[in-house]
Image: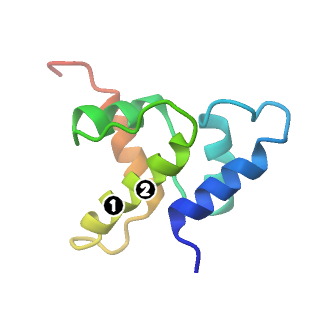
Amino acid sequence: MTTTPDAASAARSALTALPGFTTGDALASAVIAAAAPRRMAEYDRRAHAALRAVLGRDIGRRPGRYLRYMTEIVGVLDAVRVHDPEWTARDVDLALFWLGGQKEGA
């Protein structure tokens, strides 16, 4: 079976040929997550910021970012599922979204 990050990367690459999907990962990841909501996560700048600020993980901005993002999501998901096996990749990205959207001092 293909790993989740590899499947995410392949899906992202497949979407590149479509108008509007050449650059950026937000829209493409929304389509990918809609197709596989329990397995895939949506990329967002706030979730990216939370990975860096809260978890100390920097995935950078160079090509292949969605693969690196999903690798981090799966790592967090594995840790969270020890406590709650019902969590999905989408739950993780939503938690990161909210953490990354917080203003300093809030």
Q: Are marks 2 and 1 in contact (CB under 8 Å)?
A: yes
Amino acid type shown at disc 1: Gly
Q: In the current view of this chain or complex, which residue is farthest to the left? A: 105
Element at badge 2? helix
Distance in Å between CA atoms under marks 2 and 1: 6 Å
Image point (43%, 64%), residue name: 88
Q: Which residue is mark 1?
A: 75
Q: In the current view of this chain or complex, which residue is farthest to the top? A: 104
Does 90 sit left or right of 15 as displayed? left
Q: Which residue is mark 2?
A: 71
Q: Quadrant of residue 40?
A: bottom right
Amino acid type shown at disc 2: Thr
Image point (84%, 42%), residue name: 17
| Count of number-bearing discs | 2
Element at badge 1? helix
Relative to 56, say whether 4 is above or below.
Answer: below
Q: Tell me if I can see residue 42 in this picture.
A: no
Query: Residue 13's x, y, as percent?
Result: 71, 49
Query: Residue 59's x, y, as percent?
Result: 40, 39
Camera-side residue of 72 and 89: 72
Here the colouring is rainbow
